[in-house]
């Protein structure tokens, strides 16, 4: 139950982070197009503010996520005989391996 709640919380943090990244990009784009130097500086400061918010939220996400979720784990798929799927693929019949 706690894991499900944790996943929902992390999902919402990721959504917020995405929204703030979009907002930051919007301010950066507006700053590039602004002709007034003061307006450009104001927009760049707003973009920097959202950048700091994103960094803080991303560090929260990273600390909240389960370490197992951060790195994919390759689990071999065993069939009924105890051989893994990789073993099965590498054991070709003799007539297929001697085609040369």
Image: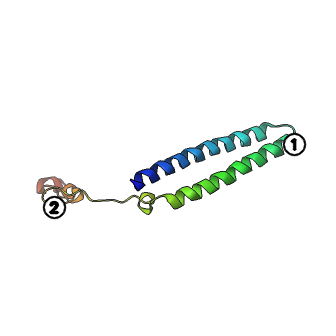
Quarter holding residue 26:
top right
Sequence-first tag of 2 and 1:
1
For the residue labelled by badge 1, is the local secondary structure a helix, a strand or a loop?
A: helix
Report the residue at 73% width, 41% height from top: 27
- In the image, is 52 to the left or to the right of 97? right
For the residue labelled by badge 2, is the local secondary structure a helix, a strand or a loop?
A: loop
User: Quick one: 43 or 10, which is closer to the camera?
Assistant: 10
In the displayed structure, 9 sits above or below 71; it is above
Residue 98 bears which disc, if any? none
Residue that carries the numbered disc 1 in the rendered image = 37
User: Quick one: 80 or 13, which is closer to the camera?
Assistant: 13
Residue that carries the numbered disc 2 in the rendered image = 82
Mark 2 surroundings: few (<14), some (14-19) or many (≥20) residues within 10 A:
few
- In the image, is 21 to the left or to the right of 86? right
Image location of residue 43, percent across then percent down: 78, 43
Q: Rounded to the nearest whole Å, what is the CA distance between mark 2 and mark 1?
A: 70 Å
Q: Quadrant of the C terminus?
A: bottom left
Quarter holding residue 67:
bottom left
Image location of residue 94, percent across then percent down: 12, 57
Image location of residue 57, percent across then percent down: 60, 54
- In the image, is 47 to the left or to the right of 5? right
Report the residue at 73% width, 46% height from top: 47
Residue lying farthest front?
Answer: 1
- In the image, is 96 to the left or to the right of 41? left
């Amino acid at each position: 139950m706690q894991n499900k709640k944790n996943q929902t919380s992390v999902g919402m943090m990721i959504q917020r982070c995405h929204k703030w990244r979009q907002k930051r990009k919007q301010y950066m784009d507006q700053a590039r197009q602004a002709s007034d130097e003061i307006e450009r500086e104001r927009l760049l400061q707003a973009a920097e503010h959202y950048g700091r918010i994103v960094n803080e939220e991303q560090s929260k996400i990273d600390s909240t996520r389960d370490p197992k979720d951060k790195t994919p784990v390759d689990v071999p798929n065993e069939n009924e005989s105890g051989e893994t799927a990789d073993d099965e693929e590498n054991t070709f019949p003799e007539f297929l391996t001697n085609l040369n």
